[in-house]
Image (cartoon, helix red, strand yellow):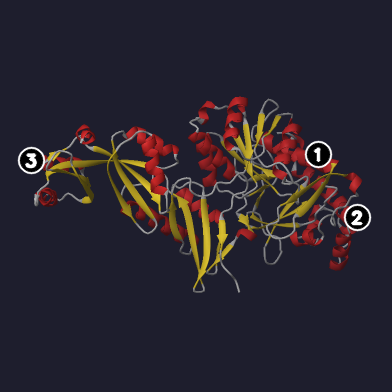
């Protein structure tokens, strides 16, 4: 299964991110991974959290618009060449990668990579055929 | 209809009323107001030559400047003991525009507003929730007296304290909401935030005016509040809200032409424009005693349409004003009305809250449109959002004929208004 990611449109304004983070904290939601795409006028904050529904509700109350997207999470060995290998199988199959962010797993010697691709089903099949582990939500939240 | 004998009268009957009232009004103005005596004498027009409503085209115009020059009471035709009320409109520059009413004036204004409420489906059994400001502004008291004249229940909430507005609406069961269209949007958003579904409220109609708004905005409000939205038009110089109003057909606004006689003129030449042609809207107060303005140039851009409406009314209809001539921005030589920007925004799926900022950089006008991103237009990729902005820029350019930079803002980040919305910030320093 795919992983739910929250995307939030954020105006470039001092203090805005801390406000958003505060609201998420206040709802008792744990952030598992995040990335920010920054442009001159705005940013998009992308979050993987352990309770997406609660987070969306809390953010909605702050007046924020949140987009829910499904992404793929893969677990690779934290070793040179592992990440490159995963990307190669996707590239060879013609899967378009929109963006990526990664973080170290709590399992020793493992890293997690979040992938936003144009075709989730296709990408997952290819990764699994190549023997690459894709994570389910509960795996990720337990990380 | 509140007054079917007028609203659906034979045209010939209306003409008789208008001719009779115009004759009286012109004489009253000439004989009681120094300004009009001078104006008529100088333009070589005798008020005693006016025989029918057709002669109106020979009469001189009155402008907002004339009201300011005669500040505060110089254009009143009656002594103070006959006045019972004074209103004033917020002059954006300098002096306010001051208007006075006799008992009779308040009566006809109330009747006009009552016709508007009735046309929006209001009856004696309805609770009319009035969120226009009460005070010198004519909005609050205008609808209030209209509601009372109709025999409905007036709820004078005035503007502000939006959470309480929603609470009263729910607890009291308001049937019809009256406020500015921008405040209606604000109330709708607040309702959503409070988790109150419009379906759970008896509210079924809204009467919105005091600022120009588009059909797109009407759709937004109707969707957000789950009601039918009726336009009401008016200006304090002529009376206040109720000069004209929407019926259930929402096909241009019926003018209370037995009291406020409308004309459309070419803005530059002052010559009458044909039916259906847009130009400056001009009113003559043919029923008023205290301030019988003759051919008052409203600065509003509209058009007139004749012919019986499907609702049965025979009164002339005016197009939803496109905006005031004063709101018109001239950007790199192109005329731009905020309402045109609003039209494009709502068509492209954005909400009705926006801000136009105009700057002059290196002697070149730059127009920026700030608008809030919506849930539907939000994507998780920069490319997606930039594409949405670009699409909007293209749509604006093709509709307005000039390029405008689009800045997408966070939802609910642009200022909300409890009264008339401020849509334009013009930072150009003209030397």
SS for dot 2: helix
Residue A121 placement (x, y as % from top left): 18, 40
| Mark found first going from the N terminus, 1 or 2 | 2
Q: Quadrant of the C terminus of chain B?
A: bottom right
Tell me: residue A10, above or below residue B170: below
Tell me if label 2 and label 3 are in contact, CB under 8 Å.
Answer: no
The span from disc 1 to disc 3 (Cα, nearest Å) is: 85 Å
**Residue under pointer 1:** B107
**Residue under pointer 2:** B32
Residue B214 placement (x, y as % from top left): 56, 48
Question: In this orientation, does residue B9 appear?
Answer: no
Disc 2 or disc 3, which is closer to the eye? 3
Chain for mark 2? B
**Residue under pointer 3:** A131
Q: Are marks 2 and 3 on the same chain?
A: no
Chain for mark 3? A
> Disc count in the image?
3
Tell me if label 1 and label 3 are in contact, CB under 8 Å.
Answer: no
The span from disc 1 to disc 2 (Cα, nearest Å) is: 21 Å
């Amino acid at each position: 299964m795919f992983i739910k990611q929250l995307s939030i449109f954020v105006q470039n304004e001092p203090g805005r991110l801390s406000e958003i983070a505060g609201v998420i904290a206040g709802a008792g939601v744990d952030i598992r991974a995040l990335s920010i795409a920054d442009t001159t006028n705005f940013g998009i904050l992308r979050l993987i959290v352990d309770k997406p529904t609660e987070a969306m509700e809390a953010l909605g109350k702050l007046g924020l618009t949140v987009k829910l997207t499904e992404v793929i999470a893969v677990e690779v060995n934290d070793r040179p060449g592992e990440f490159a290998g995963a990307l190669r199988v996707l590239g060879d199959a013609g899967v378009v990668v929109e963006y990526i962010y990664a973080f170290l797993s709590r399992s020793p010697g493992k890293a997690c990579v979040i992938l936003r691709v144009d075709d989730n089903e296709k990408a997952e099949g290819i990764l699994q055929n190549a023997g690459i582990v894709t994570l389910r939500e509960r795996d990720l939240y337990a990380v | 209809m509140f007054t079917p004998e007028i609203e659906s009268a034979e045209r010939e009957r209306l003409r008789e009323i208008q001719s009779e009232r115009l004759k009286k009004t012109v004489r009253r103005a000439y004989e009681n107001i120094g300004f009009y005596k001078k104006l008529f004498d100088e333009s070589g027009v005798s008020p005693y030559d006016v025989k029918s409503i057709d002669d109106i085209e020979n009469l001189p115009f009155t402008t907002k400047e004339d009201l300011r020059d005669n500040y505060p009471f110089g254009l009143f035709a009656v002594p103070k003991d006959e006045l019972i009320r004074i209103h004033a409109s917020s002059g954006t520059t300098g002096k306010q525009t001051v208007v006075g009413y006799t008992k009779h004036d308040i009566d006809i204004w109330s009747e006009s507003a009552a016709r508007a409420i009735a046309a929006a489906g209001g009856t004696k059994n309805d609770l009319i929730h009035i969120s226009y400001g009460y005070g010198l502004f004519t909005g609050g008291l205008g609808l209030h007296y209209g509601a009372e004249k109709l025999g409905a229940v007036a709820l004078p909430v005035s503007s502000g304290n939006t959470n309480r507005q929603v609470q009263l609406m729910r607890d009291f069961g308001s049937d019809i909401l009256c406020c500015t269209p921008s405040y209606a949007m604000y109330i709708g958003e607040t309702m959503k935030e409070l988790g109150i579904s419009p379906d759970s409220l008896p509210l079924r109609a809204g009467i919105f005016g005091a600022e120009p708004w588009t059909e797109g905005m009407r759709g937004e409000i109707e969707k957000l509040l789950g009601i039918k939205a009726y336009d009401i038009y008016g200006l304090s110089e002529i009376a206040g809200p109720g000069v004209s109003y929407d019926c259930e057909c929402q096909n241009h606004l019926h003018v209370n032409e037995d009291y406020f006689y409308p004309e459309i003129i070419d803005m530059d030449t002052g010559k009458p424009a044909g039916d259906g042609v847009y130009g400056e809207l001009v009113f003559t107060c043919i029923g008023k005693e205290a301030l019988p303005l003759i051919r008052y140039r409203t600065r509003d851009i509209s058009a007139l349409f004749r012919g019986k409406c499907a609702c049965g009314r025979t009164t002339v209809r005016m197009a939803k004003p496109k905006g005031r001539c004063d709101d018109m921005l001239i950007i790199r030589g192109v005329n731009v009305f905020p309402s045109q920007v609003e039209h494009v925004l709502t068509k492209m799926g954005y909400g009705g809250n926006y801000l136009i900022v105009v700057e002059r950089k290196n002697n070149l006008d730059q127009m920026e449109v700030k608008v809030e991103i919506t849930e539907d237009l939000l994507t998780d990729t920069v490319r997606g959002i930039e594409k949405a902005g670009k699409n909007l820029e293209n749509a604006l350019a093709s509709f307005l004929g000039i390029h405008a930079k689009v800045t997408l803002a966070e939802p609910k980040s642009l200022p909300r208004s409890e009264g008339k919305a401020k849509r334009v910030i013009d930072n150009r320093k003209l030397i």
